[in-house]
Image (cartoon, rainbow, N blue to C red):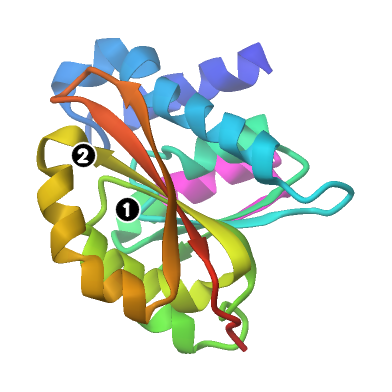
Amino acid sequence: IRMTLFFFTEQLVLTNKYINLISKKTEFNIYRKHFLDTLTIVIFFKCFEKKKKKNACVDIGTGSGFPGLLLSILLPESFFLLVESIQKKSYFHGKIINFLFLNNSITLNSRIEGMGKLKEHRGNYDFLTARAVSEINPLIQFSCPLVKKNGKILLFKQTKMINEELNYSKNSLKTSKKKIKGIYFVSSLNNGRIILLFQNKKENQ
């Protein structure tokens, strides 16, 4: 797996020269800034995954490949749908998937807003992940239809504005029947990073 991770990192840096995948300032800090977040998600998967079952995860706004693409490398027993609205980034995901023969993941060039209306996605995922995508309120609203009952939603947020965002999202959380299960500190980088863990209590059919 070491060579696989090296190839992924190498392609990320090379592609970043003509597609804006990550900040130029973080190219030399990829493992600490980006890999750390993803490794934290692996811990959650191991704690909450359903045993003897192939878990399905949808990663919203995969961007540079974190966490969804890297998760598909680290967790070959689970399935990952990588949703990205920017076509060039989605093409990058597809290139890595094809080269590394990642048969547990596919990339989808789309936006989350309309996915919950489609039968093939509605209530189809055990996990939903999102990193640096949107404010909590709209993200919860559009992610709700995608997750199975008792499915987990893992959102990466900066600690700086988290109290304000949570207060603003109170009504949305109540109406969508999602419950905050925990708030976990991940890193002190970039004003601090935390993971919000939600559990969906609604049956989506």
Q: Quickly name the residue at label 2.
A: 20
Q: State the residue in front, 43 or 68.
A: 43
Q: Is residue 93 magenta?
A: yes
Q: Is residue 109 left or right of residue 157?
A: right
Badge 2 element: loop
Q: Position of residue 120 (x, y in %)?
A: 62, 81
- In the rendered image, the quadrant that contains the C terminus is bottom right
Amino acid type, label 1? Lys
Q: Quickly name the residue at label 1.
A: 88
Residue 30 is tagged as: none
Residue 112 visible in rendering: no
Give the extent of the magenta segment.
91-106
- In the rendered image, the quadrant that contains the N terminus is top right
Badge 1 element: helix
Q: Position of residue 108 (x, y in %)?
A: 48, 64
Position of residue 105 relative to residue 119, above or below, is above
Position of residue 166 relative to residue 194, above or below, is below
Residue at the image position 79 percent from the left and 53 percent from the top? 54
Q: Is residue 180 left or right of residue 137?
A: right
